[in-house]
Image: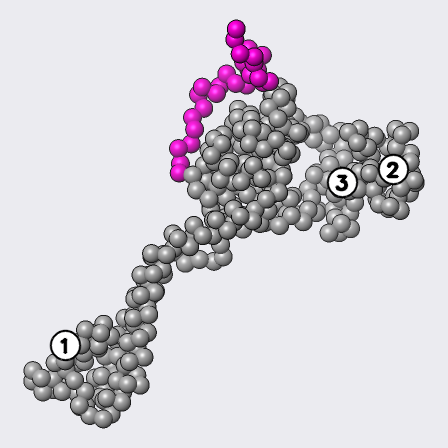
Amino acid sequence: MSAPRQPGSDRTRLPLLRSLRHWSRAEDGQSVRLPVGVTVPPLQQVLRRLAVAMLVLVLTTLVVWLDRSGYQDNADGKVDLVDSAYYATVTLSTTGYGDITPVSHGARLTNILVITPLRVLFLIILVGTTLEVLTERTRHQVRIERWRARIRDHVVVVGYGTKGRHAVETLLGQGMSREQIVVVDPQKKAVDLATSDGLAAVHGDATRSETLSRAELHRAAHVVVAPQRDDTATLVTLTARQLNRRASIVVAVREDENVPLLKQSGANAVITSSSSAGRLLGVAMSSARSADVLEDLMTYGSGLDLVERPVSPGEVGHSPRQSPDLVVTVMRGKEMLDHADPRAETLRAGDRLITIQRAASHH
């Protein structure tokens, strides 16, 4: 007897999955990238330190050459510019062959007060550069482990294209901190863009569970799935739901026919980009102003915003019309009651309201 089919596994009635055999996984190395401040490339850091070291060497050479009468060269008895550079080099590197020595009190005092601090500075530059190179990977790993220890109830955004970036902008506009958003994308450019925007990012294939695990998806509260292709969105949703049963998953797809598949795959909400754009175009044809209002409502923080909030104690027992905000829908349990529903005439404790507010009134 064959094994029972899982929801969404019937390929004969789900044309979306026909193209999966042609979809190849991204083989880029999977890695977690954390946002950092303005950083200097490693090579540039080394060159800067090398320049400082050379400056110290030149300064030491100049000090010795100006006081050359206080030094003695065992070879010919006099110290010229080349001898000064030679003495500065062996002194700063602590080699000290002893063939050129300070003999006057002034030269020895200069060695104590000037050249010795320069020697210490020179050694600090060399040792610091070495340690910087050796410990950079360890320091990055420590940051990753600290990040993993504290990240939870966050939002994982799969795909940092146009849809993903606008979703992140809306989340930030609603008051979510950048530390609570993690981006997953197979493209290195998108990952670099996300980290430059101050977000943590994972570089890898989001249809693979190990990639989503790197984003700590099993501890996430919400998942936004916004890849370029509907088949990718389906696989990501299935993988995400397998890793996290409680998270709210919102998915963007292009075609309406794929909405049932995504909901069977575990999506809580599915947004169809092509049909939404078509409906907006239709509204614009009949009323350009109405289209402007809809665009305003969909652009968080631009003027009018759709805001979901709990009913306040002062609103309980009253009509939604008495609310300071324009109430569009009353959510009571799993029911959505519009403004014309008689059951929504009296607000109850525990209700949630979908309201229209001015952007400045809820920031």
Task: Return the x and y of residue 256 as percentages of the image width and height.
Answer: 63, 22
Give me the disc on residue 348: 2
Answer few, some or many: residues within 10 Å of disc 2's Cα (few below 14, many 20 plus, some between 14 and 19): some
Task: Return the x and y of residue 281 as percentages of the image width and height.
Answer: 68, 29
Q: Secondary structure at mark 1?
A: loop
Q: Earlier in the sequence, mark 3 or mark 1?
A: 1
For marks 3 and 2, give the CA distance. 16 Å
Answer few, some or many: residues within 10 Å of disc 1's Cα (few below 14, many 20 plus, some between 14 and 19): few
Q: Is residue 135 left or right of residue 361?
A: left
- Return the residue at label 3: 308
For marks 1 and 2, give the CA distance. 91 Å
Determine if the magenta segment contains residue 13: yes
Indicate whether 344 appears above or below 201.
Answer: above
Determine if the magenta segment contains residue 356: no
Task: Return the x and y of residue 127 as percentages of the image width and height.
Answer: 31, 65
- Return the residue at label 1: 97
Q: Secondary structure at mark 2?
A: loop
Q: Looking at the rendering, which quadrant does residue 31 occupy?
A: top left
